[in-house]
Image (spheres, rainbow, N blue to C red):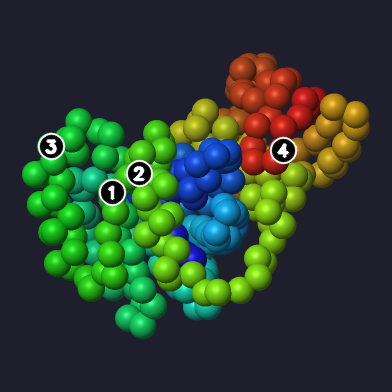
Amino acid sequence: MRLRGDCRSSERGQINADEPSHRSEISITSKKAQTTRNRVTGIYTDDTAQFVFVDTPGFQTDHRNALNDRLNQNVTEALGGVDVVVFVVEAMRLTDADRVVLKQLPKHTPVILVINKIDKDKAKDRYALEAFVAQVRAEFEFAAAEAVSAKHGLRIANLLELLKPYLPESVPMYPEDMVTDKSARFLAMEIVREKLFRYLGEELPYAMNVEVEQFEEGDGLNRIYIAVLVDKESQKAILIGKGGERLKKFPPKRGWIWKNCLITKYF
């Protein structure tokens, strides 16, 4: 199934929350649009079903360039071959960007409306929330709707039960204990990219990328060598800081990485 939403609607939080027993973090999150640049698969298996969630870059409507256009194309292409689409929108906030995404939704695949962030004060008024759900449902022919808080795991179990009837009958695609098809190397790269986005915010060049040059696994200690790539020589100063001050403060420091099945001490 495909998670879909505007790049501000926290679909990343949704895919991370859709594993109530693990609360595994699979997709990285930040306030920067299209933090996710790769198709990420999250897997959750219970006693009766296996859910395969596909997360792609958020649909970008604010800035047009070759990178964003390609990511938007990836989003549209990902809608093919899924059994159900989950459209995620922030509670009490339906934007023009959300409406642009609504126009991209398939007409012949079931679409489930998910209202996220119901833990926020503005969404705690039951009648106001019901009115908001009705407002969004009037914009598109949704198969069903659910309100959740991905951050706190509220009503995630209800959402999974709502999705089950739309899953095809088949043998499991993945082993029961598998939570993503991505490697530890990929997850380590994404963790660093997420921390850069969160640590530097708007100062960080949008086209910045991260590559894992070496990944050496040992007994309880992994050595990860990562290169941060920027477009211009002048942008290095943003990352390094005067006398390397920013690099010294940059998280994650030596310690523990927790990301999905990647639980290890690293250097």
Residue position for label 4: 262
Rate crowding at label 4 as few (under 14), some (14 to 19) or many (20 or more) other CA atoms within 10 Å.
some
- The total number of labels drawn is 4
Does the rendering let one see residue 234? no
Distance from disc 3 to disc 2, alpha carbons, whole Å, reads 17 Å
Q: Which of marks 1 and 4 precedes in the sequence?
A: 1
Does the rendering let one see residue 144? yes
Drawn side of residue 140 relative to residue 68, left or right: left
**Do the CB atoms of the residues marked 2 and 1 lie less than 8 Å apart?**
yes
- The picture places residue 26, in percent across and down from the top left corner, at 59, 46
Corner quadrant of residue 38? bottom right
Rate crowding at label 1 as few (under 14), some (14 to 19) or many (20 or more) other CA atoms within 10 Å.
many
Residue position for label 3: 125
Label 2 amino acid? Arg
Q: Nearer the viewer, mark 2 or mark 1?
A: 2
Check the image and report above or below for 247 versus 97: above
**Do the CB atoms of the residues marked 4 and 3 lie less than 8 Å apart?**
no
Label 1 amino acid? Ala
Corner quadrant of residue 49? bottom right
Question: Which mark, by number, is residue 200?
Answer: none
Rate crowding at label 2 as few (under 14), some (14 to 19) or many (20 or more) other CA atoms within 10 Å.
some
**Do the CB atoms of the residues marked 2 and 4 lie less than 8 Å apart?**
no
Residue position for label 2: 155
